[in-house]
Image (cartoon, rainbow, N blue to C red):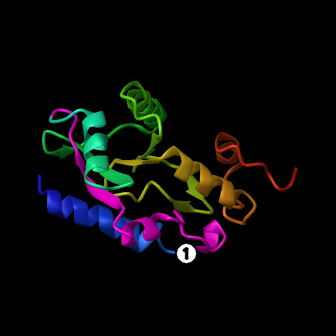
Amino acid sequence: MNREKIKNDVLSYLVDFIEVPREEFGLFPPCPFAKAERLKGKLLIDTYDPDEQLFTDVVKNMIELGYESGVFALFQNGNPVSLEEEETRGFQRFLNAALKEAGLKEYKSICINPKDRLEVKGVLVRGISPYFLINIGLRKAFGKTHKSLKGSAYFDNFPDYYKKYLNVPNKDT
């Protein structure tokens, strides 16, 4: 496993897609706050192998190194982990429960699965990710971000089922 190549692949995904304003997202980037976090040096990009380290230890290490958030490519035995789309939410719930149990209640994980078929006006947001990624951040930061985007055009092209999942009201109703 070439960790530097993996980290560069993730960085390219962030810089070339996640941070780029797009019409499909109301002229916002798919993740409007990723670029600022990265440029301020507050975003750790790395790999995570569950056979080598506990997930909560990875998060604790991230915090000890002075990062506020992280994006971790999920690998096992030197190979990228592949989960089916329907397994993503369960795995994410498992990670969030582990964070709470370890006393890291202020942090939250969001999983990005390249097998995810969520489309926003034809754009496979997670489907173009180079690996299964685990995004870790402060709950309050995710909440603040979500709240600040609710009244904007950001969610306009999201499918109704996903707006419901994200607790975003339809503007039509």
Specify whether 101 is left or right of 32: left
Residue type of the residue flagged with mark 1: Pro
Q: In percent of the image, x 40 and y 73: which residue is there?
A: 16
In the image shown, does 141 or 154 lie closer to the viewer? 141
Would you say residue 167 sits in the magenta stretch? no
As drawn, 7 above or below 83: below
In the orientation shown, which residue stands out farthest toward the right?
A: 173
Q: In percent of the image, x 33 and y 67: which residue is there?
A: 41
Secondary element under disc 1, as helix, strand or loop, is loop
Visible in this render: residue 73?
no
Visible in this render: residue 7?
yes
In the orientation shown, which residue stands out farthest toward the top?
A: 101
As drawn, 139 above or below 149: above
Q: In percent of the image, x 75 and y 61: which residue is there?
A: 151
Would you say residue 24 sits in the magenta stretch? yes
Q: Position of residue 105 (x, y in %)?
A: 46, 34
In the image shown, does 164 or 145 lie closer to the viewer? 145
Q: How many dots with numbers?
A: 1
Span colored in magenta:
22-51
Specify whether 62 is left or right of 149: left
Q: Position of residue 22 (x, y in %)?
A: 57, 73
In the image shown, does 135 or 30 lie closer to the viewer? 135
Q: In percent of the image, x 51 and y 49: which residue is there?
A: 117
Q: Position of residue 112 (x, y in %)?
A: 42, 48
Please tell me in which quadrant of the rendered image residue 149 appears.
bottom right
Query: How many residues crowd around disc 1 within 10 Å: few (fewer than 14), some, or many (20 or more)?
Result: some
As drawn, 131 above or below 25: above
State the residue position of label 1. Answer: 21
As drawn, 81 above or below 40: above
